[in-house]
Image (cartoon, rainbow, N blue to C red):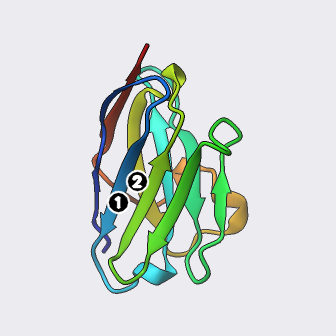
Amino acid sequence: QVQLVESGGGSVQAGASLTLSCEASGTIFRRLTVGWFRQVQGKEREFVAATRGNGGSTYYADSVKGRFTISRDNVKNMVTLQMNGLKLEDTAVYYCAADLHLILSSIRRSVDYDYWGQGTQVTVSS
C-alpha cells in the first residue's frame, strides 16, 4: 500500500511560481511512476506531468511544457512539481498519483493510477 500526501498549494497572481510536493510512504518509491493531475470542478481530471520509476524519465502535458518541472528524490520519497509562469488556466485542484506497474502508454491516463493523494488547491488570479 502506498500513501501520498500533497503540500504546497495556495493562491498566487498570474506569473508567479509555486512548488507542489508529494511525499510517499513505503519502500518501493523508486519503482513507482508518479504523476500530477489537476481537476477543475465539472471537468475531467487532466494530466500535468509524470516521472517514471527506475530511471526518472519525465513527461509533460503540452499546456505546461517549459513552465513546469517535475523531479523526484528517491531518498526522501518525494516528487516535486515546480510551477513557474502560472496562468489563470492553471487554477485547479492538483493531485499526486502513483502506480507500480504503469506502462508507458498509460502514463497520461488517470484511470490507470492506483494510488492518489487528497489534492491541493492552486488558485491563480489576475
> In this view of the protein, which residue sits in the foreground, 101 or 87?
87
Give the SS element for disc 1: strand
The residue pinned by badge 2 equals: 96
Relative to 125, does residue 106 appear above or below in the rendering? below
Other residues around mark 1 within 10 Å, as few (<14) / some (14–19) / many (≥20): many
Residue drawn 35% across the image and 76% down it: 77
Numbered label attached to residue 63: none
Q: Residue type at mark 2: give it.
A: Cys
Other residues around mark 2 within 10 Å, as few (<14) / some (14–19) / many (≥20): many
Q: Quadrant of residue 105?
A: bottom right
Relative to 101, does residue 123 appear above or below in the rendering? above
Assess whether mark 1 and mark 2 are in contact (beta carbons under 8 angstroms). yes
Expressed as whole percent of the image width and height from the top left, the position of residue 22 reads 35, 60
> In this view of the protein, which residue sits in the foreground, 31 or 65?
65
In what quadrant of the picture does the C terminus appear? top left
16 to the left or right of 57: left
> How many marks do you count on the picture?
2
Relative to 121, does residue 57 appear above or below in the rendering? below
Expressed as whole percent of the image width and height from the top left, the position of residue 75 reads 36, 84
Expressed as whole percent of the image width and height from the top left, the position of residue 79 reads 42, 64
Residue drawn 70% across the image and 66% down it: 104
Relative to 104, does residue 73 appear above or below in the rendering? below
> In this view of the protein, which residue sits in the foreground, 26 or 57?
57
Q: Quadrant of residue 67?
A: top right
Residue drawn 62% across the image and 81% down it: 55
The residue pinned by badge 1 equals: 22
Farthest top residue?
A: 126
25 to the left or right of 48: left
Q: Residue type at mark 1: give it.
A: Cys
12 to the left or right of 40: left
